[in-house]
Image (spheres, rainbow, N blue to C red):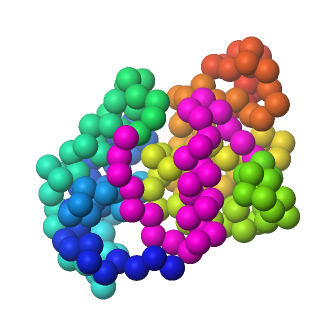
């Protein structure tokens, strides 16, 4: 597992978005370490959750590029993020998270597709667990992974947010022709 030694003081910020408040945690280097749905948690609750790791200070300025790029995403001015990331996880999780970043905007793949891309078609459950442990929501687009039939399954932010993000991007389930995009007949959410 990667460790957190030498990362210095982390900066945290809470900011609004169309899917609710988001929590960003950035390292001194500027690398994004966490992006998650705040789900009504207070700063004190978040600080308690982050206790035991590197010190954290609330600093909207240091998290500014994360907030700016997400604002651009939510105003359809950005389809790809250009943020340095510091993903902490097992070697398998890191492989899954890097593969997630290869799923294009506006597309969805199944957990089975992802397992095959990783060279082990029988690792669907392990891929699902790694997907669920993704510490950087939206930017590492775990929302772009759907069940074998194209059905929405599992998402840390809730299925309503997963649906919103996929619809926002005009995503389509694997195998659906382009004509089924953006709410037309054959939509993922039909």
Residue 15 in percent (x, y) is at 27, 47
Using the image as rendered, state which of residue 99 and residue 170 is in the foreground. 99
Q: In the figure, residue 115 lies in which quadrant?
A: bottom right
- Visible residue check, residue 44: no
Using the image as rendered, state which of residue 22 and residue 89 is in the foreground. 89
Identify the residue at the far front of this view.
119
* Residue at image location 59% in from the left, 43% down from the top: 102
Location of residue 124 with respect to 64 vertically, above or below: below
Identify the residue at the far bottom of this view.
52
Residue 71 in percent (x, y) is at 32, 34
The question of residue 100 being in magenta is answered with yes
Residue 87 in percent (x, y) is at 44, 64
Using the image as rendered, state which of residue 143 and residue 29 is in the foreground. 29
Location of residue 148 with respect to 182 vertically, above or below: below
The question of residue 112 being in magenta is answered with no
- Visible residue check, residue 121: yes
Location of residue 53 with respect to 91 vertically, above or below: below
Residue 45 in percent (x, y) is at 30, 72
* Residue at image location 73% in from the left, 57% down from the top: 118
Magenta residues (range): 82-110
Instruction: Determine whether, in the image, residue 130 is placed left or right of residue 115.
Output: left
* Residue at image location 59% in from the left, 35% down from the top: 104
The quarter in which the C terminus is drawn is top right
The number of numbered discs placed on residues in the rendered structure image is: 0
Q: In the figure, residue 59 lies in which quadrant?
A: bottom left
* Residue at image location 50% in from the left, 50% down from the top: 140
């Amino acid at each position: 597992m990667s460790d957190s030694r030498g990362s210095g003081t982390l900066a945290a910020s809470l900011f609004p978005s169309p899917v609710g408040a988001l929590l960003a945690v950035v390292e001194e280097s500027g690398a994004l370490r966490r992006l998650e749905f705040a789900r009504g948690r207070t700063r004190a609750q978040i600080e308690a959750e982050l206790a035991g790791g590197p010190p954290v200070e609330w600093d909207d300025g240091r998290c500014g590029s994360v907030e700016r790029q997400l604002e651009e995403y939510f105003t359809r001015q950005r389809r790809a993020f250009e943020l340095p990331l510091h993903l902490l996880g097992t070697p398998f999780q890191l492989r899954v998270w890097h593969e997630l970043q290869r799923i294009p905007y506006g597309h969805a793949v199944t957990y089975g597709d992802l397992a095959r891309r990783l060279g082990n078609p029988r690792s669907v459950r392990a891929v699902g667990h790694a997907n669920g442990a993704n510490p950087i929501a939206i930017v590492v687009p775990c929302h772009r992974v759907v069940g074998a039939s194209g059905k929405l399954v599992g998402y840390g932010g809730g299925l309503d947010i997963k649906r919103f993000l996929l619809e926002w991007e005009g995503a389509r389930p694997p195998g659906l022709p382009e004509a089924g995009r953006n709410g037309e007949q054959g939509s993922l959410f039909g």
